Amino acid sequence: MRWLIFAFTLTVTFTTFALVSFVDLPEPEDEQVQQFPNHEPESDEEKAAAGAALAFVHALNRERPADACRVVAEPLTTAMRCTKRPRIPRDLQVSAIDRVRVFNIRLQGATGEAWVSGTSPGPALSISVRRVDDAWRVVANNGGFGLA
């Protein structure tokens, strides 16, 4: 009889916990992503920086390291061996899974960050950019964030 009462209590406790957890679940991921404050490229500077980030991602997607080397600056020029025989390191490999676009960009003086969607890893890829002479260059691929 004691085991029956223990089993019944355990069942009620588990059911209550499951119901409370279900009711208290956070909102779906899609709604959370839409709450992220997006700032698409608007000014000429933002469009130029976004263009460099997109050119970099497209070159990585097409596996063309020489094309990617045209829009990068240190430390990526060293990591990609742009002066000798260009290559795409494993941690920089990107593939397109949808239309690739810059959905958020933040520039602060001569540096900035562009968030690119439509890539794997994803759902977004963070690209750091820096103004070098008169052009925007990619200086880091900060990686993607997503569900693992």
Image (spheres, rainbow, N blue to C red):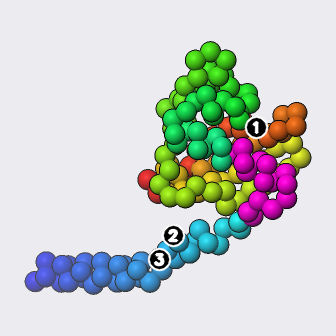
Q: What residue would you read off at disc 3?
A: 25
Q: Position of residue 95 (x, y in %)?
A: 49, 46
Q: Is residue 100 above or below residue 7?
A: above
Q: What residue would you read off at disc 2?
A: 29
Which label is found at residue 45? none
Task: Kindly identify the residue that appears in the image at 59 percent across and 68 percent down.
Answer: 33
Q: Dividing the image into 4 quarters, which one contains the N terminus?
A: bottom left
Task: Kindly identify the residue that appears in the image at 49 percent across and 32 percent down.
Answer: 90
Q: Position of residue 45 (x, y in %)?
A: 85, 51
**In 3D space, how far apart are the residues under numbered discs 3 and 2 (Cα atoms)?**
11 Å
Q: Position of residue 146 (x, y in %)?
A: 51, 56
Task: Kindly identify the residue that appears in the image at 78 percent across and 54 percent down.
Answer: 47
Task: Kindly identify the residue that appears in the image at 62 percent across and 15 percent down.
Answer: 84
Find numbered disc 1 in the image and state the secondary structure of the residue it sits on. Answer: strand
Q: Which residues are magenta?
A: 39-53
Q: Mark 1 or mark 3, which has the lower sequence index?
A: 3
1 or 3: mark nearer the eye:
1
Q: Is residue 70 left or right of residue 16?
A: right
Q: Is residue 148 above or below residue 76?
A: below
Q: What residue would you read off at disc 1?
A: 137
Q: Position of residue 67 (x, y in %)?
A: 63, 33
Determine if the magenta segment contains residue 40: yes
- The amino acid beneath tag 3 is Leu
- The amino acid beneath tag 2 is Glu
Pick the front one: 5 or 81: 81
Image marks 1 and 3: residues in contact by CB distance under 8 Å: no
Neighbour tally class for label 2: few under 14, some 14-19, many 20 plus, Cα within 10 Å: few
